[in-house]
Image: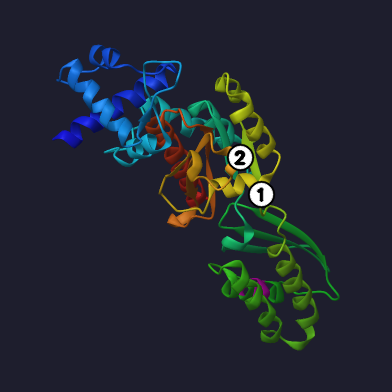
Amino acid sequence: MLEERRLAVLRAIVEDYVATEEPVGSKALVERHSLGVSPATVRNDMAALEDEGFITQPHTSAGRVPTDAGYRLFVDRLSTVKPMSVAEKRAISTFLDGSVDLDDMVQRSVRLLAQLTRQVAVVQYPTLSSSTVRHIDVVALAPTRLLLVLILSTGRVEQRLVELPGELSDQDLADIRSRLLHATVGQRIADAVTALGAVPDLVAPEVKPSVVTVAQTLAEAMSDHRSDERVAVGGTANLARFGTSFDTAVRPMLEALEEHVVMLKLLGEASSDLVTVRIGHEGPVQELSGTSVVAAGYGPQDQAIASLGIVGPTRMDYPGTMASVRAVARYISRLLDEQP
């Protein structure tokens, strides 16, 4: 009972401090929250929370503010992630459904996250190494020229023109297409590249040189890592909300935004349908100890292939932010699932 009451006091302090940016006193807590106890009891609970390191008293104020440990306890004891409203869900679907390709979807997602959370949003581009082959098509443009189309589970589409050493009949083309699909569809990139190397040995000798060219071209397309370790960043204007903490929070953040590797480190390892929260000094970058990161993995078929999230001050609306990050991650995953 005592622990639950003190958790209620801590929750009230966090909510008030996030809303007002002002240290919270016992009188304000009693007035704003139905805690069901006297101001004296609240003061005792606040003293206990301070002794345990969950809140602290700025030297210029009689009120208290949460510490990193206080925010962590608050987040860990959230019974449920705040549900998204119908309007918010509709806004997400309307905005993301208009995506024309993977790049557009990433750019839309980062803008949407920044708008929903009023924080700096970061979305990692899916990496080729973690994706699988969804489809391959071979289209004859001329007797000795083919268009190869490679579609990955990430939604990425690669197209390559190939000049062949000899002509292929319609039957040859159908046979090659069938063998390529059988060898690669559903395979992870590394396995698909290996499988492609064996395809030329399965065809007639007279078409083998052409099949070698096709297989090598597709393998090169699969091994193109231009999108690896790329992130999209949005909402940098929201850094203005940090107020007086420019040197301790905003300046290091601005510098970090220039380094994609740093932003990927902040997002951490992707985990499908699991929202992770790293608060203050828990993060991997010491210079950003004044910030928190809320992140989630996304990908098709419940397989996390990349991460997205937000970076902001430790004083943030954790329930609302966690809900937004999870909702956007789930919606992108659904879009990737629905792609042909």
Residue drawn 60% across and 21% down? Answer: 240
Please give the range of residues in magenta: 174-178
* Residue placed most toward the observer, 65 or 217: 65
Image quadrant of residue 192? Answer: bottom right
- Near mark 1 (Cα within 10 A), the count class, few <14, some 14-19 or many ≥20, is few
Q: Is residue 327 magenta?
A: no
Q: Which residue is at a point 23% across and 27% down the rendered structure image? A: 45
Q: Is residue 194 left or right of residue 161?
A: left
Q: Is residue 176 part of the magenta span, yes or no? A: yes
Sequence-earlier tag: 2 or 1: 1
321 over 228 or under it: above or below: above
Percent across and percent down for residue 316 are: 45, 28
Residue at 58% x, 19% y is 244
Instruction: Name the residue carrying label 2.
Output: 287
Q: Is residue 90 visible?
A: yes
Vertical placement of residue 73 versus 117, above or below: below
Please name the amino acid that badge 1 sits on.
Val
